[in-house]
Amino acid sequence: MAPTDGQRATTLSDVARRAGVSIATASKALNGRGDVAPATRKRVLAAADELTFTPNAAARSLLAGRTGTVGLLTSDLEGRFMIPILSGAEDAFGAGQVNVFLCDARGDAIREQHHLRALLSRRVDGIIVVGRQTDPRPSLGQEIPVPVVYAYSPSDDARDLSLTPDNYSGGRLAIEHLLSCGRTRIAHITGDPTYAAAQDRLAGARAALGAAGLDFIAEPMFAAWTEHWGRDATAMLLERHPDVDAVFCGSDQIARGVIDTARDLGRDVPGDLAVIGYDNWELLAANARPPLTSIDANLQQLGRQAAQRIFDAIDGADIGSGTHQLPVKLVIRGSTIAHR
Amino acid sequence: MAPTDGQRATTLSDVARRAGVSIATASKALNGRGDVAPATRKRVLAAADELTFTPNAAARSLLAGRTGTVGLLTSDLEGRFMIPILSGAEDAFGAGQVNVFLCDARGDAIREQHHLRALLSRRVDGIIVVGRQTDPRPSLGQEIPVPVVYAYSPSDDARDLSLTPDNYSGGRLAIEHLLSCGRTRIAHITGDPTYAAAQDRLAGARAALGAAGLDFIAEPMFAAWTEHWGRDATAMLLERHPDVDAVFCGSDQIARGVIDTARDLGRDVPGDLAVIGYDNWELLAANARPPLTSIDANLQQLGRQAAQRIFDAIDGADIGSGTHQLPVKLVIRGSTIAHR
DNA sequence: CTGTTAGCGCTTTCAA
DNA sequence: TTGAAAGCGCTAACAG
């Protein structure tokens, strides 16, 4: 790159001058607008090329009123859930002419407000707010002059549009799968009970069990979303309920711990004990012994949908409102069904 | 948000009119520039507040020549290494008035070129290029009119500035730690041999061994960066070299596999076998049994430094050139040193 | 202290 | 078919 490029970037008038036309004509030629003589257009294009002209988006957006820019307001960039969503959104936008402003508020409301202002000042055409839990988060308010969609964490205001994974169905799906594998003595080891995700998955699971005239073999075990807890809980579980034949885990991390301890204690997975995780975190699920059956929340898809909604709203469509639960899917691996 | 806000955003002249002053005065009052009577300033501020005025950054940057915007060109957003770097950069910028444009090229050169054009068109003040391996990547070229810094993947052109972790020192550090733990029969299980990371770490490790008058107990074992390979390799290793007393692993994933298999085969970690990983991926390292000693590449710090360089270059400093190896650090956990 | 004037780079009427 | 002129929203001289 140029260490200290004294000269400003080349402008349209540079191109025009070089091509020997007015800047109006140059503009038309470059944008294929209006009637420009083929020869003239050619000359302008050549000039632009020689000068490596790059139109100034700021100037353009001043006129247009739109910036072709969308803000992504995350609260925890490091988190596991941000990335696929962000990636899906970037994907959906990237196809077109939209660029993404990334802002990480680090879970801090002040910083979030600060970033929001910055985005508004840059006249983003829309904003996607990505949270780190499925618990509702405070709305940014109804005063935002551009479309906003909340992804993962729904807004606590029903007038906002929120997209969040359907944890209830996830829980149901998990149990239905275990039942279809012939398991009936099922336990549930999950994470922090204050998380909506934990409660919703449990509720869905209970519903599925109830529909089959069953209940969990033991009270659901809550603590942390960690391998460590998965191990400890499993040791307790196997001691108190040695006849358990399946465990539905609230996360893949927990499931990893469950599998490891079951193995240590001489249980065959999935022979003696079927284990199903949640999140389908490839890194953890695919490398477990045996590989982990899990529920996938389709987060990338969720991100794409969020982007699409923004698109539509920019094009004048009503963005809609309310919290939409997006479908999740079951990914079957060796921890619930043995290889033939 | 407003579903269809017919009215354009409020502008400075709206504020001026409401405050009964000229737009010049309003501008000065708002920016604390020039001499404005306290009463007038108050009136302007009030008007701006009532109208929730947000200055148009595009208009501003047209004058200023700078946009307060930096481009982040990644090649693999999902990757493990992007996030901390990106996060560190966002952090460094976020403190000031800079916003980050995120572009994910998905490892595709065409898409990268496309995104580069978009960034240039938006007149970013600088660009950080984040790669997914420590192998050199093609330079964007010397024609870019703004400062560029390459993070993680260095550029293949020495005239560019690149920041990359010091894998050689990492390898050295790992071995020195094992030696200081009294281990002398050390093996190396690592990933894909075509990765510079694998070779650099190995070279550093060899140097440290050589300095102690030692060599690896067996030829380094190369294959994949996976738990699976860690397990398979360990089974082979323990069979052929039962007297091995330490394993330096090329990644934390590999190390997890090593620990698990060592355990399965009745070896105590760290009693019989010390294991050290690489990357210090918290999720894997902290939850291993025992928790994994590892080498941390300080990626967030790397991201911050990249941002700082961009800052400095924007302020007129020379951005520098060449590939700079940034220090890594040892993080000691239970897999190399037993609890007392 | 305040307001007028002149643009930043670009698009878009509207004449010529 | 081309170009002159009028801004988009804002800041920075320079007068008043």
Image (tube, coloured by chain):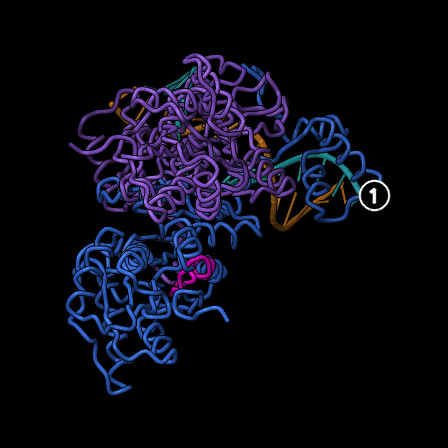
Chain colours: A purple, B blue, C cyan, D orange
Secondary structure beneath disc 1?
Answer: helix
Single out the residue that lies furthest toward the right. B39
Front residue of B194/B189: it is B189
Q: Is B292 contained in the magenta span?
A: yes
In this picture, is A259 found above or below A173? Answer: below
Q: Residue A287, percent across and down? A: 28, 45
* Residue A98 in view in this figure: no
Residue position for label 1: B38
Residue under the point 29% across and 40% down: A268
Front residue of B254/A98: it is B254
Neighbours of disc 1 within 10 Å: few (<14), some (14-19), many (20+): few
Q: Residue A320, percent across and down? A: 50, 14
Q: Is residue A45 left or right of residue A201?
A: left
Q: Is residue B154 left or right of residue B217?
A: right
Residue under the point 36% across and 19% down: A176
In this picture, is A93 found above or below C16? Answer: below
Front residue of A59/A164: it is A164
Q: Residue B294, percent across and down? A: 38, 64
Front residue of B24/B280: it is B280
Instruction: State which chain disc 1 sits on.
Output: B
**Span colored in magenta:** B291-306
Q: Residue B142, percent across and down? A: 28, 58
Q: Is B309 contained in the magenta span?
A: no
Amino acid type indicated by mark 1: Pro
In this picture, is B338 found above or below A36? Answer: below
**In which quadrant of the rendered image does the N terminus of chain B lie?**
top right
* Residue B211 in view in this figure: yes
